[in-house]
Image: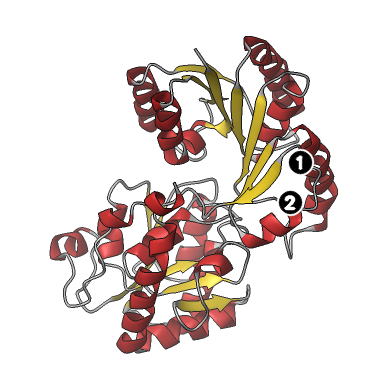
Amino acid sequence: MKKALMYASVASMIDMFNMNNIKILKDLGYQVDVACNFEDRSTTTDAKIEAFKKKLHDLDVSYYHLPIPRQISKIGDIIKSYQLSKKLAEKDYDVVHCHSPIGAALCRLAFRHSKTKIIYTAHGFHFYEGAPLKNWLIFYPVEKILARYTDILITINQEDYERAETFNVRDKVVKVNGVGIDTSKFKERNYAEKNSQLLNDLNLDEDDVILTSVGQLSKRKNHRVVIEALAKLKNRKIKYLIVGEGELRNELTHLIKENNLEDEVILLGFRSDIDQILGITDIFVLPSLQEGLPVSLMEAMGTGLPCIVSDIRGNRDLIDNKLGGYLCNNEINKYQKMIRLLCMSKDKRFLFGKYNAKKIKKFDKNVIN
């Protein structure tokens, strides 16, 4: 029987984005194993990890824990993960599909002398236009060197694709439109009415203009700039919902209190009803400093929402400026202006949302697959 290994830094990467790939491999007759960090909780919960393990068990997929860290400073975990990965390389897999910068680097190093076909999906290089110099000094040479041990390098945005084409990959570099989304499951935003029960649960009014962001509470997601823009706007009818959890919860909570925005900015934590949240949303906001091709933004577009996003790689691949929303540089005043503009114009919100709902169809998982 043919054997395949799905390899990533954290379990949530496989759970959220690769279960369909595992099922495809199973349908093709592969025995599939999974290797990742099952103990990292920065992007998930104990309950979700246990549910993920059960899904793997039900699919007859074996899994291995690797203590792959999210920071390159954790040398001990990196060395241990590499040693365990070398043992996996002895299992004679036919193909290994790796993800995440640190995980993919360890995987390719461990498998470099094997006969295994190595596929690497880059969900967004850490070096990009506008990235800090240290990212270029550390991650760029690593990716360029490890490309020689990569048979197929999959990129998900145009900037990464063009850069990867300059690497010495064994076989080829390809570009796909991300992991894809099921556009059929998202109901297009009905601006005529909102779910009154959900509004009541969140202490929101029918006439509030609701902004929503979905993403980890981290520096990379940059929620701070929107909170500070709202502090300047001083409009009590604009509400900002942030879905996600992370290490910056306390810092953001302090920022909200410091600006007396406790009634305007709500940290929702993890939610299982994101489609319902998007259903009461008027404007989707994604102020990230770095993205690959964000699924949260694709889902917002599928719901038919206008979007205000940072002018970065990935976001630019999805949002057409002044057609589906606005691309912003990382300035508080810019976000303040764009939020005020869209909050004042229902017509613009409607037109931008319609445009996005149409454009996102080419990112449907059935089109991509």
**Residue 149 screen position, x and y as percent:** 77, 32
Label 2 or label 1, whichever lies nearer to me, is: 1
Looking at the rendered structure, the number of numbered marks drawn on it comes to 2
Q: CA distance from mark 2 to mark 1?
A: 8 Å
**Residue 264 seen:** no
**Residue 247 screen position, x and y as percent:** 54, 46
Residue 341 falls in image quadrant = bottom left
Image-based side of 31 in relation to 305, left or right: right
**Residue 51 screen position, x and y as percent:** 34, 27
**Rendered residue at 81%/40% (across/down):** 142
165 or 65: which is nearer to us? Answer: 165
Image-based side of 279 in relation to 43, left or right: left
Residue 152 lies, with reference to residue 56, above or below; the image says: below
Marking on residue 217: none
Residue 279 lies, with reference to residue 51, above or below; the image says: below
| Of pointers 2 and 1, the one earlier in the residue sequence | 2
**Residue 17 seen:** yes
Image-based side of 69 in relation to 298, left or right: right
Image-based side of 246 in relation to 49, left or right: right
**Rendered residue at 60%/72% (across/down):** 311
Query: Which residue is label 2 attached to?
Result: 164
Kind of residue indicated by mark 1: Val
**Mark 1 residue crowding within 10 angstroms, few (<14) / some (14–19) / many (20+):** some
Residue 72 lies, with reference to residue 299, above or below; the image says: above
Kind of residue indicated by mark 2: Ala
**Rendered residue at 45%/37% (across/down):** 44
Query: Which residue is label 1 attached to?
Result: 169
Q: Report helix, strand or loop for mark 2.
A: helix
**Residue 256 screen position, x and y as percent:** 46, 64
Q: What scheme was used to colour the molecule?
A: secondary structure
Residue 165 lies, with reference to residue 11, above or below; the image says: below
User: Quick check: marks 2 and 1 in contact, CB under 8 Å?
Assistant: yes
